[in-house]
Image (spheres, coloured by chain):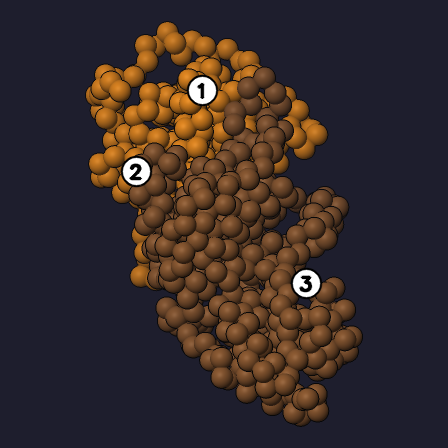
Amino acid sequence: MNNTTSSLPEEEWELVKEYRRAESLREVYLTGSKMTHYCPGCGHGQIHRILADQIDYLGIRERTVIINPVGCAVFVYYYLKCDHIQVPHGRGPAVAAGAKRYLSYLAKQRGEPEPIVISYQGDGDLACIGTAEIIHAANRGDNITVIFVNNAVYGMTGGQMAPTTLPGQVTTTTPSGRRVEDTGMPLPVSEMLSVLKRVAFVQRTSLYSTAEIRKTEKAIRKALQYQMENKGFTFVEILSNCPTNWKMTPKESFSWIKNEMTKYFPLGVFKDIGGKEEKA
Amino acid sequence: MGERIFIKGNEAIAKAAVLAGCDAFFGYPITPSSEIPETLAIEYEKGNLPIFLQTESEIAAINMVMGVASCGGRAMTASSSPGISLKQEGISYLVGMELPAVIVNVNRGGPGLGNIGPEQSDYNQATKTVGHGSGHMVVLAPNSVQEMAEFTMEAFNIADRYRNPVMILTDGYLGQMKEDIVFPEPRVEHYDKSGWATTGAKGREPHIISSIRLSHDELEEHVSKTLKPKFDLMEKKEVRYEEHLTEDAEILLIAFGTPSRVVRDAIERARAKGVKAGLLRPQTLWPFPKERLRQLGERVQAMICVELNLGQMVDDVRLAVSGSCPVELLNRVGGNLPSEVEVIQKIVEVANRLGVTR
């Protein structure tokens, strides 16, 4: 364990400046086609690509296990060339806790490097049905990385209200807009987790601009590096879009993230035990 | 090993798990099963159990078991009735994902919070469903502290053999009572899990452990061509039961767990009163010894099920004998156990009614 910063010199980001396929990304998906199962314009594809790039960069593909949630990202395993466990709704951090402990035990016995366990989850999965699991995994300081994709809506089931839905936002279960009096406010998970002592890293990023995508890349890389260094629980919340259920074009959806979502979900680093706090 | 020790049922389960090569235990406190995590916490601190965690919930515990099982480890969780209800989703996933695991249910009184007395009211939950969906698991039913230890050790082997969860269904009496036992020499079966375990895709194609099969045909194929033959094989190979005085029995009693101990004594005393009574004790509740019961049903005058619920196993006995003899029920609930006298009275009453007394 060291407490020095892991922020990377700019030249290391040259890697992703020209287009190439991430080696950790399948060329032909397990569906048998090059088409993704995600809707046009959906942010999951970008996030998968970013995750694959960082796994490549860190050279950890062969020791990474990805926990697949229930939700649109149930099929992460179609796309990333790692081992995968598809788990019950919201229970990703618990499955990760078990998997990580056992794989670390095996790795120590065999003198192998730290295994990497990533729980990839959406907002219904993580911030609603899985609140107990995420809070306790964070509080224990489980040495795992959670990628939290927040798009303010239940996507897979057809656009119902999520715990992260904005006040007034129209969904299929809030036809006149989310009423705070009935259903509360958008749940600020990053802020909540950042107060827990054993959490190593929490950052909220977005996908709405190239600069934000770069921040997302850096955040995921840092989270995975911390896990490699056994620094504890790392969490990256990504404000993503859902053009289908928001009934917007992809372009409009990114503007909505920038102009509306960030009012309730400010971007930035909420916790970083590794060094200097980065300003969003 | 070989040494006779005086030990609680729950402690026997915990120590047997360690002897069986359990890699990880996850659990949440609940009476009357808490001695299992308590004993394993000590074993963990002694370095005899690699992974132990008291979890935030019953749900987290079964899902952590899933995580270890996915990576090829031997994992166990233990609870009591309300906690087992919470684990049902996870158990269903384990079946769908084809993962081995050992789940202990120290059955207490229900429904709801009920009480902490012994019951067998989770019989249907254990034998008829594995949460949602079509599935089965082997359910082992010990009736002594000795069997608590033996069945726990065997449960890990059965789970690995079929890549399927196994339940030990015991009750509050057996969990809490102390008896002297001898731990058997562990007989750990080793199965190669390298073809499916998620240990990192090093030099091989990625492994995917999942229970989702979106296309109707694919799910049908999984359930009927992969899971069903396994369930059939378990039914064929894993039925266990014990018989006592059944050779010439005219009245056959069927009981498992704690009541079977009362019944065993009662049939001997009923014989002194001139009724030829016998006992069939299922040691597996699923698969159920239905073929043996069918055979006995053609020979005996009547059967009496003694169980600690409103009558659950009795349905399986009736299905097995398919009307070839009358099947009666003697039951208690709420944490109560039928006394030996009650059982004898029931045997004599049935015998007199059917005219089978000497």
Residue drawn where x is 55% and y is 72% of the image = B264
Residue at image coords 61%, 20%: B204
* Image colour assigned to chain B: brown
Q: Quadrant of residue B314?
A: bottom right
Q: Residue furthest top?
A: A11
Residue at mark 2: chain = B
Marks 1 and 2, how far apart at CA: 22 Å
Answer left or right for B44 relative to A29: left
- Whether residue B270 appears in this view of the structure is yes
Task: Judge by depth and name the residue closer to the eye, B303 or B172.
Answer: B303
- Identify the amino acid type marked 3: Pro
Give the chain ID for the orange colour. Answer: A
Residue identifier under label 1: A110
From the viewer's side, name the closer residue of B291 and A2.
B291
Q: Position of residue B59 (x, y in %)?
A: 43, 51
Dot 2: few (<14), some (14–19), or many (≥20) neighbours within 10 Å?
few
Q: Badge 3 sits on which subunit?
A: B
Q: Is residue B148 above or below residue B273?
A: above
Mark 3 surroundings within 10 Å by alpha-carbon count, few (fewer than 14), some (14 through 19), many (20 or more): many
For the residue marked with disc 2, what is the amino acid? Glu
**Secondary element at tag 2:** helix
> Which mark identifies residue B289?
3
Q: Is residue B250 above or below residue A243?
A: below
Secondary structure at badge 1 equals helix
